[in-house]
């Protein structure tokens, strides 16, 4: 049942109560469906919940980056990388967001139909690639993009809850992946070596990784570590945002009154000029549209952890070796915490801030605790910037033939793509 309809399966499980239990082969699994229990896993007792063996397997491919590492090593890396995501720095990354969104807005033609999911994947790949590597990305962009999308497909597969319980990856896929990894290795390795020679801060993420120092002992990352972190950011930073953007266009098409309100805000705040960092704060409705989309279609729709110590959860004894699971998709639509949970109502964010809802763990598109998404600030800025530039010029309407469905791997992908008609406003 889980494999047939993953989100539906969890929704039905939630009817059983705040904690439900299932077994997959020999694996005991606990599904936690109350904000207090979710906080317990992410924050209060985080040390008892670690990333599972799927992540250990991902290490073969992804190296030991922020997503796959654990324990003290993860904390050290996280400390060293945090400054690269401080507000002042994120403002720098707005430049590629504007450049590539403007380019896409110029390229689209009135009346044509495009797969908006592909468009958004392409756009966010360019943005994160450029935020990471600056100008060097340009020469190898196509080769990098192709290698990355192969890597992402397999990475996605590896991250599905319980994938470690399935049969091994088919050989051909592994070979394909290794080839993609070698390409990434070669290009990223060359860029790192050239940078080490030149030194200096070029304002991109790679510069920050190369300059980062451990505050305890002053040590820096090895080239290999910089590579692992760069690949991790590349992978983690593009499909998530693209998925959110795709569902957002779909929601706007289904709710034309909300689309009109969005267009009116963009016209009044920006007129015909490009957005500046200050505008991102002023585009409140645009941000609410992005937030509401991630409530209904959280790009990361569930998170799993291995329980490493016996632990009591809501009166149940959960033994070490169990698997614990929480779901953004289910909690974000829980009628106990949301009025009209299945309706797209960006206005609800006028009364409730995303920060407050995240603290309560009724809304956690970016996870929580020490493993909360390091790219959260980047993503809010990216969502608002890309939307404001594209929607300033264009209105998108769903192709009537388009089927809608989920392919929930690590991200909540639209199963059949998202063909939409593009019309000038
Ligand atoms: C809408 C966009 C995004 C969403 C919804 C999202 C969601 C998440 C979630 C839920 C986690 C926690 C996973 C867990 O607890 O197992 C996470 C972790 C992470 N994300 Fe994001 N993410 C987004 C964009 C980004 C971007 C733009 C970057 C980088 C540029 C990024 C980099 C990372 C990294 C490195 C981690 C691992 C953090 C750690 O374990 O310390 N993400 N993300």
Image: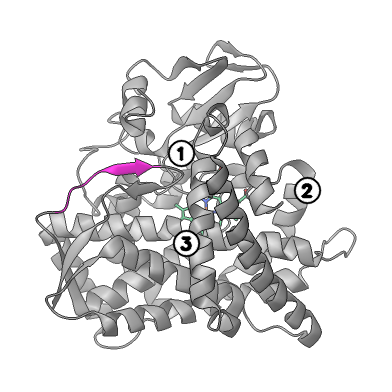
Would residue 207 appear left or right of 323 to someone viewing this image?
Answer: right
Which mark, by number, is residue 73? 2
Element at label 2: helix
Q: State the separation of the CA atoms marked 2 and 3.
A: 25 Å
- Residue 389 position, x and y percent, is 31, 77
- 365 w.r.t. 38: above or below: below
Where does label 1 land, which residue? 360
Do the CB atoms of the residues marked 3 and 1 lie less than 8 Å apart? no
Which mark, by number, is residue 238? 3
- Residue 333 position, x and y percent, is 30, 36
| Labels 2 and 3: the sequence-earlier one | 2
Q: Quadrant of the N terminus?
A: top left
Element at label 1: loop
Q: Which residues are magenta?
A: 402-408
- Residue 319 position, x and y percent, is 64, 14
- Residue 320 position, x and y percent, is 67, 18
| Labels 2 and 1: the sequence-earlier one | 2
Residue under the point 40% across and 80% down? 100
């Amino acid at each position: 049942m889980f494999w047939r309809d993953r989100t539906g399966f969890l929704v039905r499980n939630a009817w059983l109560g705040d904690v439900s239990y299932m077994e997959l082969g020999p694996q005991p699994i606990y599904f936690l469906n109350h904000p207090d229990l979710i906080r317990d896993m992410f924050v209060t007792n985080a040390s008892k919940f670690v990333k599972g063996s799927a992540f250990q397997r991902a290490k073969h491919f992804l190296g030991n980056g922020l997503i796959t590492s654990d324990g003290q090593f993860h904390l050290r890396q996280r400390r060293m990388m945090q400054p690269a995501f401080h507000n002042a720095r994120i403002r720098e990354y707005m430049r590629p967001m504007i450049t590539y969104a403007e380019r896409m807005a110029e390229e689209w033609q009135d009346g044509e139909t495009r797969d908006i999911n592909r468009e958004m994947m392409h756009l966010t790949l360019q943005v994160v690639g450029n935020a990471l590597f600056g100008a060097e990305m340009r020469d190898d962009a196509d080769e990098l993009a192709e290698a990355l999308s192969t890597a992402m497909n397999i990475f996605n597969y590896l991250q599905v809850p319980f994938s470690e319980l399935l049969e091994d990856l088919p050989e051909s896929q592994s070979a394909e992946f290794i080839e993609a990894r070698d390409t990434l290795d070669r290009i990223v390795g060359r860029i790192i070596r050239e940078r080490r020679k030149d030194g200096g801060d070029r304002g991109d993420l790679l510069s920050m990784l190369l300059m980062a120092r451990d505050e305890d002992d002053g040590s820096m990352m090895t080239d290999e570590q910089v590579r692992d972190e760069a690949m991790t950011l590349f992978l983690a930073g593009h499909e998530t945002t693209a998925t959110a953007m795709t569902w957002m266009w779909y929601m706007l098409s289904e709710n034309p009154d909300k689309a009109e309100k969005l267009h009116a805000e963009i016209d009044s705040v920006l007129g015909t000029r490009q957005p500046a960092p200050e505008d991102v704060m002023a585009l409140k409705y645009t941000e609410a549209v992005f937030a509401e989309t991630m409530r209904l279609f959280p790009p990361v729709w569930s998170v799993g952890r291995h329980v490493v110590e016996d632990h009591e959860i809501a009166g149940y004894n959960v033994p070490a070796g169990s698997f614990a699971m929480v779901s953004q998709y289910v909690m974000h639509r829980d009628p106990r915490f949301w009025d009209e949970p299945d309706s797209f109502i960006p206005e609800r964010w006028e009364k409730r801030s995303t920060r407050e809802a995240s603290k309560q763990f009724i809304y956690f598109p970016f996870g929580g605790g020490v493993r909360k998404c390091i790219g959260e600030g980047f993503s809010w800025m990216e969502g608002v910037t890309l939307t404001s530039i594209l929607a300033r010029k264009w209105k998108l309407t769903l192709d009537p033939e388009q089927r809608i469905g989920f392919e929930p791997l690590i991200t909540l992908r639209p199963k059949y793509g998202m063909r939409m008609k593009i019309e000038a406003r």
